[in-house]
Structures are given as structure tokens and as C-alpha cells.
Image (tube, rainbow, N blue to C red):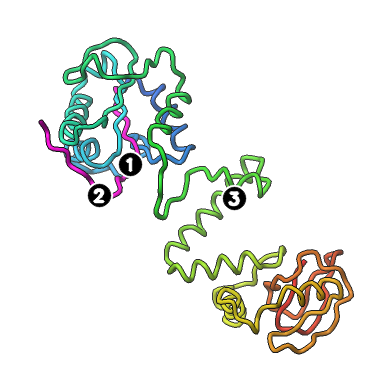
Amino acid sequence: MAKKKTRTKEPEFDVALSFAGTDRPYVENVATHLRKMGVKVFYDKYEKVTLWGRDLYAHLQDVYFDKARYVVMFVSKSYRDRLWTNHERKSAQARAFQENREYILPARFDGTRVPGLLDTTGYVDLRETQPKELATLIRTKLGTIERNEFFPSTPDRLFKPLQAKSKQRQQLVCQIANHYFEMSKLMTRGERLLIAAACRHACPCGLPDDVHLRLDYLARIHSRLLGDVEASQTEDETDIQRHTGRYLSPRGRAAKTVNVNVRNEGRIDSRGDAEACGEDNQRISFSPRLRVSA
């Protein structure tokens, strides 16, 4: 009996697709749906830059043997007869034999018999399954996916709160979010928390320019993260201030009263200027170190 080998490192791909070129239209549709679901999928068209100049024989053997959690094998007469698909199949079967588990997930276009694939192996009949349905089955098979520093190709959960309904606006949201994600990968965990707090407490009109250089602003945010008593208000004080419009500086000195109703009390004005937004969005100057924004 084959000895089961446990892999501890996270695979590069959640699933690798093995198929014949004649079946590409169906498979490409599946790959598209998988990417939208946040699945890391090996599909040759997505790997053009990686494959360029590589020894494809060695690279594909590595992918189908060692780089994926599962291999979906799209079985057809063309799949059985093609040279490259046989190479992929043998690599995947070697991995399945080594681990002694369901590594290969067969999906059949027809009843073609493939060497090493037993008739008793469970499969999905593609004659009765739409590409999106198969993608959903694959996603379910993968179970819970935990990512380290992963950004989905389509961040759909951002579109609704940001009201990104048009394709153009969705592309803009995706571009900005992806840029922020890439920048955050260069930060320490503490720096990420600090920037997240700055965004959470920011004025709706936006963060100050060069926020990473505004040491006074970031220091105030940092003191809030640490629960600095001087930089925070008690619940009772905050409740009184909400009704009077009076805010205290970190040292407890009374600031000038702002005779407007502030919509989002207790937030720090991101601009670092001595002003706040009233209900009519007019800028109103006042003096405290801790500032509020509409």
C-alpha cells in the first residue's frame, strides 16, 4: 500500500484544470467562474507570462504533481489521445498514488476510458452540467479557503457599499483597492492597523494628503488604538458633548463650542486643520486638538 505523504506548505493553486484544446470553450467558462469565486486556478491562458520561455514538460509536471490541491480532469476522446494531456494525467496520477486520496476530480464529456482512471471513480457528467454549476461544485469541494495576502480578481463585496454599479466604476474600485492592497503588503501588522484606524476615523471628504507623513495625525490615531486616556472621552462625556457641541482637547481644556449638529460624532478630522463639517457641509473652524467630522 502506498504510504500517504502530507504536504504542509500552502499550494500555489487551489485547482489545476487538465483538458484537451478541443474542449477549451467549456473549460474556459469554468475557469472564469472560478476566478470570480476567488479560487486560485491553474489555466494555461492565465499563465502566459509564467509559461513564456519555460521548459513546459518540467513545469507542467511540477504543477500537476505538486502545485495544486486538486486536479480537475476533463475526460474526452481528445483528452485520451493528446500527448500533453497524457503527460498532465500521469503527473496527477503519481500525486494521487503517493497521497492515496481523491486528488483527481474527473469530469466527463463522454464515456471515454482513460488509462489509470477506474470506472468506479466518481465523476461529474458534463453533458448534464453547465460550466457555472461545475465551478460551484469545485468551490464546494475545496471547502474553507484561508488566504495569506490574497486579493480576489473581482472584489465584488466592495461594489455594493461603494455603489459601483457600472463596469467603469467597478474597474476603478478594483484598481484603487488592489493598489492599496499591494501597498499594505509592504507594511508591518502594526502599520496596517494604524492606517485602518485612520481610514475608519477619517472625515467623509477624505484623508489628508501624504497621510503617512503626518506624524501628528498618526500619533493621535495611535493613541486611540492604545486606549490613551488623554486622547479618549468617557461615554458620559461624549454623550454630553453630543448634545452641546462642546469637545475637549486631550489635556481636558474646553474648546470653542460649535453650534451645529454633528452627524458622526467623535471622529477625528482627517485634514489636521482646525475645522469640522456641519450638517450643511460648510466648513467651520474651531480650536481643539481632537476634531470631529460630519
Label 3, label 2: how far apart the Cα atoms are:
35 Å
Residue 222 falls in image quadrant: bottom right
Find out whether residue 8 is within the magenta segment: yes
Q: Position of residue 48 (x, y in %)?
A: 33, 40
Residue 269 falls in image quadrant: bottom right
Q: In this view, does 199 lie to the left or right of 110?
A: right
Q: In this view, does 134 lie to the left or right of 88?
A: right
Q: Give the range drawn in magenta.
A: 1-20
Secondary element under disc 2, as helix, strand or loop, is loop
Q: Residue at x 50, y 57 (%)?
A: 179
* Residue nearest the observer in this picture, 3 or 249: 3
Label 3, label 1: how far apart the Cα atoms are:
26 Å
Q: Position of residue 229 (x, y in %)?
A: 63, 82
Dot 3 or dot 2, earlier in sequence: 2
Task: Give above or below for 291 relative to 40.
Answer: below
Secondary element under disc 1, as helix, strand or loop, is strand
Front disc: 3 or 1: 1
* Residue nearest the observer in this picture, 13 or 232: 232
Dot 3 or dot 1, earlier in sequence: 1
- Residue under label 3: 173
**Amino acid type of the residue that numbered disc 2 sits on in the rendered structure:** Thr
**Amino acid type of the residue that numbered disc 1 sits on in the rendered structure:** Phe
Residue 52 falls in image quadrant: top left
- Residue under label 2: 8
Label 2, label 1: how far apart the Cα atoms are:
14 Å
* Residue nearest the observer in this picture, 194 or 101: 101
- Residue under label 1: 13
